[in-house]
Image (cartoon, grey):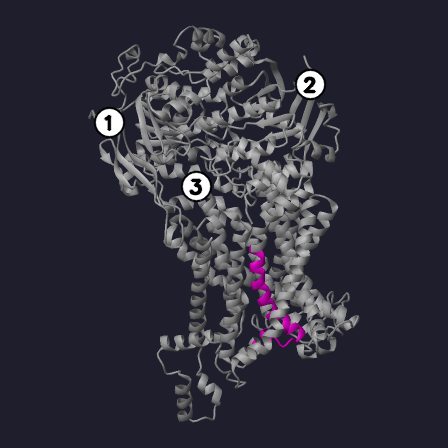
Amino acid sequence: MTASLLDIRDLSLNIGDHPILKGVDLSIAPGEVMGLVGESGSGKSMTALTVMRLLPFAAQASGNVRFDGIDLIAATEDQMCALRGDDIGMVFQEPMTALNPVKTIGEQVAEGIRVHTGAARAEAEERARKMLDRVGLPAEKFPLSRYPHELSGGQRQRVVIAIACALKPKLLIADEPTTALDVVLQKQILELLKDLVRENRMGLLLISHDLAVVTEMADRITILRHGEVMEEGETARVLSEQVHPYTRQLAQASMHVPKRGVLPSPLWGGSANDRSAAEIVRRGEGGGDIHPSSKTEPSSPPPPRLDHFASQSALADPPHKGEGKDGPLLAVKSVSRLYPGRRLSLFRRDTPVHAVDDVSLSIAPGRSVALVGRSGCGKSTLARMILALDRPTSGEIRFRGETVTGKGEAELKAARRDMQVVFQDPYGSFDPRQKVERLVTEPLHLMEKKPSRAERREMATHALTEVGLSASDLDKYPHEFSGGQRQRLSIARAIITRPKLVVADEPVSALDVSIRAQILDLFADLNGRLGVAYLFITHDLTVARAITDDVLVMHEGRIVERGATKEVLDRPQSQAARALVEAAPDLHRAIARKMQEQG
Amino acid sequence: MTLHTDVPEERLTDLIGKALANRSFFVGLLIALAVAGAALLSFVWTPYDVARLVISDKQQAPSWAHWFGTDHFGRDILSMIMLGARNSIAVALVAVGIGMGIGVPLGCLAAARGGLLDEALMRLNDLVFAFPALLSAIMITAIFGPGAVNAIIAIGIFNVPVFARVARAGALSIWPREFILAARAAGKGQTAITLEHILPNIATLLMVQGTIQFALGILAEAGLSYIGLGAQPPMPSWGRMLFEAQTRMAVAPWMAIFPGMAIVVTVLGLNLLGDGIADIIDPKARRQR
Amino acid sequence: MTAYLLKRLVIAAITLVLASMVVFAVLEIVPGDPARLMLGMNASAEQVELLRSQLGLNDPLALRYLHWAGGLLHLDFGRSYTYSVPVLDLVRERGVVSLPLALIALALSTVIAIPVGLYSASRRGHAGDAVAMGAAQVGVAVPNFWFALLLIYCFAVWLRWVPAGGFAGWGAGIWPALKSLILPAIALALPQAAILARVTRQALLEVLSEDYIRTARAKGMPYRAVLWRHALRNALIPVLTIMGLQFAFLLAGTVIIENVFYLPGLGRLVIQAIAQRDLIVVESVVMLLVAAVIAINLIVDLSYAVVDPRLRSRE
């Protein structure tokens, strides 16, 4: 093994009395890509900030961190300033807030160059220009005088990368550099990082919660959990052998596909998933059927689902009565939503923006449908119109045969009762000042007959048990729950009125992989048991593949492709769908490729 | 001032423990209670009867008999300060009440409705903001003549746009949150959402602003009575006492020092209390201390 | 940019017009007949009637407003009932005291507050920060006129460095005039500086916890350089907002402070005018001060656009 560029030995870190890192070891050779993987709270970011010595005030680090022969724990602040940005560059997670809003991108890139090289402004700007060209922001479209707010998230992340790499550091630290971006942008940014690292022979510490992303990129991988290193080694070996149980658990959760239409096992870890990932990979290599998701049979809409699920009957014949009609549950007919264009002057506006452009779709009772697309494609706007939280500019939305477009709250009551919502952010979707009972029973306000207090409590208890929580949780406040539990609460609130349709807007994208697997199971289970139809809004194809029957691909306000999920994801026809499929990180594929590379 | 309103609700006992451990809050609360206590006590007892003028005792320096000395009519300054506290507290409190009572609903309405109504209400706010409390007081006095009620109205009018802005800004930061969307999906209307979700979540924000405006109200009342636009004699008021002390600074400085100290301590106490509340409720601000 | 400027200008103009209507309307409902007031109790009904029509008091309300507002545009404020001179002369004579006083106070408060705020923010949690913010906490609570009394007692009565009150007039030279404005300006400025220092510190600390500060630090910039080059400009927006509000307070404050120091400024003029029921003077001074507040708010709005590029490109 070559001499390490970065060598961390027995690093421990406390914030106040909280131990964050407990004896972490990690080393990176020059030019090597090290993937640091772990779920939230595992201490990945703190490890990076220790190397940069940009820790919060109350943090106390001990142990041995050597970079290029320098002891980083003992280094003075002046020494650190000399290292930061020159020998060690860092890219952060949130591109929208990582740049100073009142300074031009040119200034911000040139600044680091001037600090370290003492170059004159003109010279530094020339180098900044070259760097911006290199990261894909050409001069004609992105002059140095641009301000950050004039750039999109992906473009801003390129600027941050330009800042970090401007002086060709020996080590680049990228802390979840693509988590805030959609899959297509993620792929572009990762490729850019890969090229920059190769060109300049930089070491890269890539931090991510996404095993697939790290597997694609990293030579070696370190798996962190609760501040301790679980496993470390060559990427291909670690992920193919999966010696450590936690590694196996992470890998399985990343590839997890819920059992559909089978009676509950709300907790993750069912028998069907006991095959090791290595086995799956081997199967994957062998033939076209890489994805065990083929268990959910493809079917063309509307559903004759008479395969092996038929005996379960839950899906074939939804338990809801009074449905009578054969018509679709939800029908969206050429709906458009325009937003007024940018104001050019006091009296003139730009042409209006079509957030949603002439979209039609329908969902049959009990079906699970995915609406996938890149961020900003209009999928959330469409969802809000379906939920009657926003009004279409034109077109009509019918729910159970009755129009919901343009109706007042009183007339919407019946529709709202049968149509509920689960949001992305398990932290933001509850009023922090109300207790669970009140939060979960909020939709009961829609019932014709107002339930009594005792009835409400009983219904809330019932809803909680259905999502795997208990009656004792009724008197707690939302902050007493973990992210996954809150998402369960969110689902409990959505199903308390026994709706026919649940719209879920990125319901698992804020969750750690193991939690995500559990929540996906819960969704699948409820679909089977209650016959509720889903509209899943997501940019994550693994989610779509896991629990939906049909998929709609949205691009720039239009639906560009639709069909059975497996069909579309395996053989995408449209440009937009192909881009999504190609960019989606896939652990099977990544492991297979790594095994070829690393033998 | 921006307050992070995503505050986990805590158990009452925890909150009280935290409050008492917070020095700003504790000292502020003590001062506020002491001033309020003195004002209440003055209804039943003061060291001396200030209605009786004892010219023989005039302009005496502080002593054991008269802790804060006496004024040019021989009245006990401590007793005057206790009586003056009533006036100050009453004026500032009612003015905060006016400001909150009108401003908060307007701010919430503007935030809930948006559009033209919002724009119109905010322009109205600008208009009121263009008249500092003193100018309103001048105009009101010009019409109705001087008096304590003028001070209340003038300061109250000034408070309205302050609370309207704070309530609107707070409400606007809550409206886009997902739990509001969830409430809307549950069929709750604007009024129900405002009452059940918005107001509880901006309550601390309003409470902090309330203590600030209370303190400013006491300062403004003192200023108005000082130039003769506020409380009129014989009603004792801190500002008036300072006015009377001015020409006697050279011979009886205590006449100016103690009423002034009363104002400083009261305002300081209220500000500490406000800081303390913000501190306890808002973990972000506390981290920055 | 131009759209933003135009919008702000239009809003300021509308506010000004509405404010003038309020001032006019309020003084319209004041009981008492200005003509009777000017002529005194001995005048005959005919004389009063004659003056009323001369003053245009018999015209319809809207016409009188237009007449008055039109006059304002030409700086014609009418004639004082008691002094029988054009109000403009009075205002000009008194304004040269009040305006410099308010401006000196604003400058003083800014010059004290911003460095203190920067110092405190950069030494957060250290003894220096605690002392500065403790002093600011007390400073916020001090009424300016009481502070003025203490200053007079200390520097005029006891040390005899400056006059206790009165105004030498600009005619006697800049220095004597300034000398009589020093104490009033300090009395006005210090409590405001305490507020501004607290706001500056708070704004800086808020900005310092932003992500882009971490990005700047990751470039290798020292903490102090980050504070100056990245944090200060972003913290300026709340600071400017408070400075705008403070100017209004300072203008109002001059009214009180002038009474403490016996300065012949607008404040004294207006208090005397109230006592003498010289409503046209009250009306004019209030209108002038309101216009000044609106103008300052406009300047603050425009300076936002200079500081923040996001405003320039939005409407």
Chain ID at mark 2: A
- Alpha carbon distance from label 1 to label 3: 31 Å
Residue beneath disc 3: B176
The region drawn magenta spans: C241-269
- Is C267 in the magenta? yes
Question: On the image, which quarter does residue A326 sit in?
Answer: top left
Q: Which residue type carries mark 3? A: Pro
Answer left or right for B248 relative to A422.
Answer: right
Please tell me the numbered disc located at residue A4. Answer: 2
Q: Residues within 10 Å of mark 2 (few under 14, many from 20)?
A: some
* Residue B164 appears in view: yes
Residue C160: percent from left, percent from top: 78, 73
- Residue at the image position 44 percent from the left and 64 percent from the top: C13
- Secondary structure of the residue carrying tag 2 is loop
Q: Which residue type carries mark 1? A: Pro
CB under 8 Å between discs 1 and 2: no
CB under 8 Å between discs 2 and 3: no
- Secondary structure of the residue carrying tag 3 is loop
Magenta span: predominant SS is helix
Q: Residues within 10 Å of mark 3 (few under 14, many from 20)?
A: few
Q: Which residue type carries mark 2? A: Ser
Please tell me the numbered disc located at residue A328. Answer: 1
